[in-house]
Amino acid sequence: MEKIKSDLTEASQKATGLKNTTDNLKQISTIETDWQTTIVGNQEAQEKIQLAQETAKQIASAIMLGSMNLQSVAKDFEALDQLVSQTEFQRMGG
């Protein structure tokens, strides 16, 4: 029978990758707008840019939450692996 084993290191690497992606998304979503030009469509463009920035921040927050959840679940699985391995060892008389 093959054992299922969690890998906290790999989960942490994936979570770190998600965090780095989130940081990049936050940096990319910083856009300067021209508040002085009064050409037609400029105000609508500013509103769309602001909406895009807010959406990017919401996505970044969701990704960050997913990253934190991934690490939390990985830690829980690691603890469960330890418990199971100790239980199996004790059942075998160790």
Image: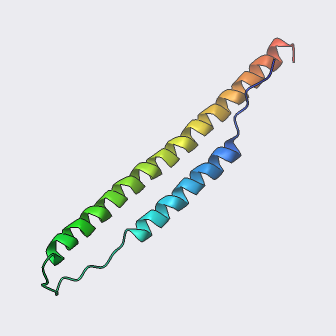
Can you give x and y, in whole percent of width and height, for residue 23 in the image? 48, 64
Q: How is the image coloured?
A: rainbow
Query: Does 18 sit above or below residue 73?
Result: below
From the viewer's side, name the closer residue of 69 and 33.
33
Can you give x and y, in whole percent of width and height, for residue 30 in the image? 36, 72
The picture quadrant where one finds residue 26 is bottom left
Query: Does 13 sit above or below residue 75?
Result: below
Can you give x and y, in whole percent of width and height, for residue 72 in the image? 55, 40
Can you give x and y, in whole percent of width and height, for residue 56 in the image? 36, 60
| Residue at image coords 46%, 52% | 64
| Residue at image coords 43%, 70% | 27
Report the quarter where the N terminus lies. Answer: top right
Query: Does 53 sit above or below residue 94?
Result: below
Query: Does 15 sit above or below residue 89?
Result: below
Report the quarter where the C terminus lies. Answer: top right
Residue found at the very far bottom of the displayed protein: 36
The picture quadrant where one finds residue 44 is bottom left
| Residue at image coords 15%, 74% | 43
| Residue at image coords 59%, 55% | 16
